[in-house]
Image (cartoon, grey):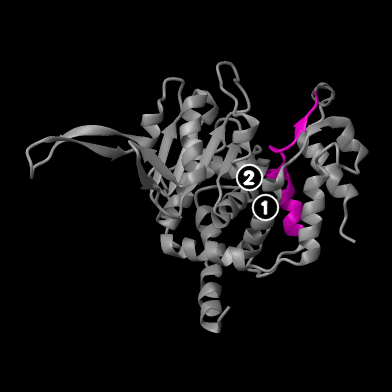
């Protein structure tokens, strides 16, 4: 990396703490979730947010978009939502030059920098698949033509862990497309008290734009250049392989797990560890990056058996056990 590039990147990285501070003007608490969403953005992936109603999932995403000056769209997923409502559709218009009727593609709400797919598990698989295809390909194909999605592009899908009647859970293969599976918890007593004080008056914080679209694209390029040692890559490989019952050295995994994570999990862990390093103003990955991100990266890529579900064993417990057993030498 040339010295001029390094100076430029350092100036961009120095703005990341300011970005988190700006988001904190509106969102009280949830620092870990905010960091993980930003990690997903820097790594160029998408994330799934799970939390009960009222934890400011929508507000968090909207606030981040405003602080980044990125175009934001929200899609409320319902049982009657159709693929065309997401990707767009062709409409019949007059061609003023020829006077003939022509079909023109009208872009849907997915053509934005940040797309909030609210309650994605409340729409049928056909509609889910339309969005997930755009996530993977970064383009929409309609009528034989490809329409590129804007860059940077981030989809944040949400789902409610309660009220599962009438929902369409995402299949495992589609869950695997999400880089991170982030779980939101209730705020602490102090945080909730601050929420009550700050949101029930007349004051409305003004957000400043910290980074531009081009800045984010540059930071995404930087993320891939962050150094990670061979030892840490080897550790990530062993950790991911240890989630698979047939290959795992862990009796705990063999007892509770039905199947484990695929190679995409290892790729995600490397990229997100690099992104976490950038977010913390470092240019090299450390073991803490890997261990803290193991949960949101692996929790939706491990399937437990019926016995585990009956005994109340969760994927997070399996991951915690693996991190305890597999230590860096």
Q: Residue at x 40, y 46 (%)?
A: 72
Image check: 78 left or right of 285? Answer: left
Main SS of the magenta part reads helix
**Number of marks in the image?**
2
Which residue is disc 2 drawn over? 180
Image check: 90 left or right of 191? Answer: left
Q: Is residue 205 visible?
A: no
- From this view, report whether residue 122 is shown above or below residue 196: above
**The C terminus lies in which quarter of the figure?**
bottom right
Does the magenta run of residues contain 289? yes
Q: Is residue 299 visible?
A: yes
Q: Residue at x 92, y 37 (%)?
A: 251
Describe the element under mark 1 as helix, strand or loop: helix
The circle drawn on residue 267 is 1
Q: Earlier in the sequence, mark 1 or mark 2?
A: 2
55 or 62, nearer to the observer: 62
Q: Residue furthest front?
A: 144
Q: Residue at x 27, y 38 (%)?
A: 105
Describe the element under mark 2 as helix, strand or loop: strand
**What span is in magenta?**
288-305
Q: Residue at x 66, y 63 (%)?
A: 277
């Amino acid at each position: 990396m040339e010295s001029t590039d390094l100076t430029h990147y350092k100036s961009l990285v120095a703005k990341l703490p300011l970005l988190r501070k700006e988001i904190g003007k509106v969102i009280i608490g949830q620092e870990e979730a905010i960091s993980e969403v930003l990690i997903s953005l820097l790594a160029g992936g998408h994330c799934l947010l799970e939390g009960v109603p009222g934890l400011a999932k929508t507000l968090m995403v909207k606030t981040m978009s405003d602080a980044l000056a990125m175009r934001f769209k929200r899609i409320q997923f319902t049982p009657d939502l159709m693929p065309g409502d997401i990707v767009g559709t062709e409409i019949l218009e007059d061609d003023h030059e020829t006077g003939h009727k022509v079909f023109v593609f009208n872009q849907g709400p997915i053509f934005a920098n940040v797309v909030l797919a609210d309650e994605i598990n409340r729409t049928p698989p056909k509609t889910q698949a339309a969005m997930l295809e755009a996530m993977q390909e970064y383009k929409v194909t309609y009528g034989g033509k490809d329409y590129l999605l804007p860059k940077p592009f981030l989809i944040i899908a949400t789902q409610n862990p309660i009220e599962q009647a009438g929902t369409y859970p995402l299949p495992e293969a589609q869950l695997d497309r999400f880089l991170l599976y982030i779980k939101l918890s209730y705020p602490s007593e102090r945080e909730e008290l601050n929420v009550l004080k700050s949101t029930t008056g007349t004051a409305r914080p003004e957000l400043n734009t910290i980074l531009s679209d081009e800045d984010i694209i540059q930071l995404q390029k930087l993320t891939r250049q962050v150094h990670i040692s061979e030892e840490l890559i080897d550790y990530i490989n062993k950790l991911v392989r240890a989630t698979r019952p047939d290959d795992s050295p862990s009796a705990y995994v063999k007892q509770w797990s039905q199947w484990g994570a695929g190679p995409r999990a290892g790729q995600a862990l490397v990229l997100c560890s690099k992104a976490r390093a950038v977010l913390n103003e470092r240019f090299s990955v450390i073991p803490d990056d890997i261990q803290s991100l193991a949960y949101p990266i692996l929790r939706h890529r491990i399937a437990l058996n019926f016995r585990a579900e009956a005994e109340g064993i969760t994927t997070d417990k399996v991951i915690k056990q693996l991190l305890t057993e597999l230590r860096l030498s």
